[in-house]
Image (cartoon, rainbow, N blue to C red):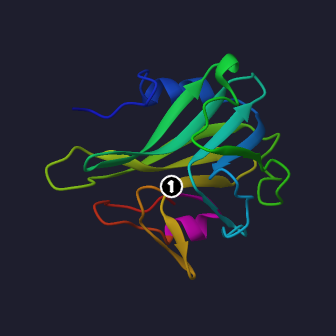
Amino acid sequence: MQWEASDGIGLAAVREAVRGGVLKSVRYAVLRGVDWPDGHRAERVHEVDMDVELVLESGSAVMLSWAVNGLDESLAIELREPAAVGRNFSGEPVDVSDHPDWAPFVGAVITDIVPAWHVPNEGFSEMPWSFRFEFDVGSSVVVALGEAAGNGFNYLPDELVVIFGGDLAASYVIPGSRHSQD
């Protein structure tokens, strides 16, 4: 079975809908009762418990969430219409638009979304483990499955990391993937 975006419209349609969109705001979903970044790494690498929502000036949004279904482990991506934006988070939404790491990207144009694929377990189909959001400011942001570990990363299918900087993103390679998300 071929992987497709969690909203059923397919990755190509999500990419096409988002290209050229201007990033307006960013929210992370964290465990209820937890303040972000308390206990989470938050400098060039953000640890996020559950969801990342990128809201566009058009009013729509891209929602990224970890998805584990048995032995299938992937990063789900969904295009949300304006009426669904800010709703149905897996946890407590926290606006991080003003965080210094996001400053160069809020107000910038998304030029592409590039997935990195892995085979989560033997005999399974390839699934995305990260998405790189390229912007017209000449830089990118990566949202991936995993956690920060010292100066690097560990693959963890039920946590998200947001990585600012191509050098850091290129250093993160997981088992079952042929490449990093650089």
Q: Nearer the viewer, residue 97 or 178?
A: 97
Q: Is residue 117 above or below residue 151?
A: above
Q: Position of residue 167 (x, y in %)?
A: 59, 70
Is 82 in the magenta? no
Image point (75%, 58%), residue name: 35
User: Local crowd at mark 1 within 10 Å, few (<14), some, or many (≥20)?
Assistant: many
Q: Is residue 136 visible?
A: no
Task: Give the quadrant of residue 43.
Answer: bottom right
The residue that mark 1 highlights is 144
Q: Is residue 56 left or right of residue 73?
A: right
Q: Position of residue 88 (x, y in %)?
A: 60, 31
Q: Is residue 128 above or below residue 170?
A: above
Image point (60%, 64%), residue name: 166
Furthest-front residue in this view: 33
Image point (51%, 43%), residue name: 65
Secondary structure beneath label 1: strand
Furthest-left residue in this view: 123
- Give amino acid for label 1: Ala
Q: Is residue 36 left or right of residue 171?
A: right
Q: Is residue 86 left or right of residue 144?
A: right
Q: Which residues are magenta?
A: 160-170
Q: Is residue 16 above or below residue 106?
A: above
Q: Quadrant of the N terminus?
A: top left
Q: Nearer the viewer, residue 60 or 27?
A: 27
Q: Position of residue 103 (x, y in %)?
A: 83, 53
